[in-house]
Image (cartoon, grey):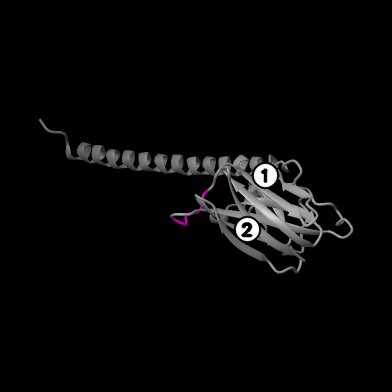
Amino acid sequence: MGLPTRAVRRIKDGGRHGAASTVNILLVIMVLASVIAAAFLYNQVVAMDNACPMPSGMSMEMSTGGSMTQIVQNATTADYKITLVIGPPQNMMTLCQDTASASGMVMVQGTMMAMASSTMSGTSDYHFQAHVYDISTGAPVLPPTSSVTIIVTGSSGLATSIPVAEMFDATQGPQSMHYGNEVQLTPGKYAVTVGVAGETAEFNVTLS
């Protein structure tokens, strides 16, 4: 004996209403999950911003960039092509300070030399960069920072070892990763020795 027609309709209508209620509940759950996820990400960003310590010795002074002509030289070793770039001092920042509108160098590893608030008499500030490439493929190479050295020797024979930090240009992104630091030197002629994993490349430059 079948169910009355009205009873069948009620069952069908109840099923439709139940399905609609289930969909509505799922939508509410999805919205709440999205809100919670957004709040979590916001808190993570805030925490990262608040936990952005300045690396030891890092100078955060804004630099005007100077007016010196950038020096670019290339040299090779058995396994590497090394490009030495010397230019005016740069604005330095940490990874969590890097934004789409940022300009300067983003330090990834190492210690950034602190520039004196006022340049010592007779000296100028410079930014030294050493870009390392595989000599066979030309692809960028990122050896451990501890295996990279930069030594600057003046005409008097006085040698200055530059603490090496790993960094990239904020406007170019991580593909511009290189090794270097800020340094104060007296303008003049210098021999620059860049060491990578025990191999060395020699450069001769004139700083103005």
173 shown above or below 33: below
Residue 89 is labelled as: none
Quadrant where the C terminus is found in the figure: bottom right
Dot 1 amino acid type: Asp
Q: Nearer the viewer, mark 2 or mark 1?
A: 2
Quadrant where the N terminus is found in the figure: top left
Circle 1 — which element?
helix
Q: Nearer the viewer, residue 122 or 78?
A: 78
Residue at point 68%, 55% (across, down): 192
Task: Give the extent of the magenta segment.
Answer: 137-141
For mark 2, what is the residue?
Answer: 84
Dot 2 amino acid type: Leu
Indicate the position of residue 127 as horizontal and vertical percent values.
71, 57
| Among the 4 quarters of the image, the one containing residue 45 | top right
Residue at point 60%, 44% (across, down): 42
Q: Nearer the viewer, residue 34 or 146?
A: 146
Is 3 in the magenta? no
For mark 1, what is the residue?
Answer: 49
Determine crowd level at label 1: few under 14, some 14-19, many 20+ residues with C-alpha closer than 10 A.
Answer: few
Residue at point 33%, 38% (across, down): 18
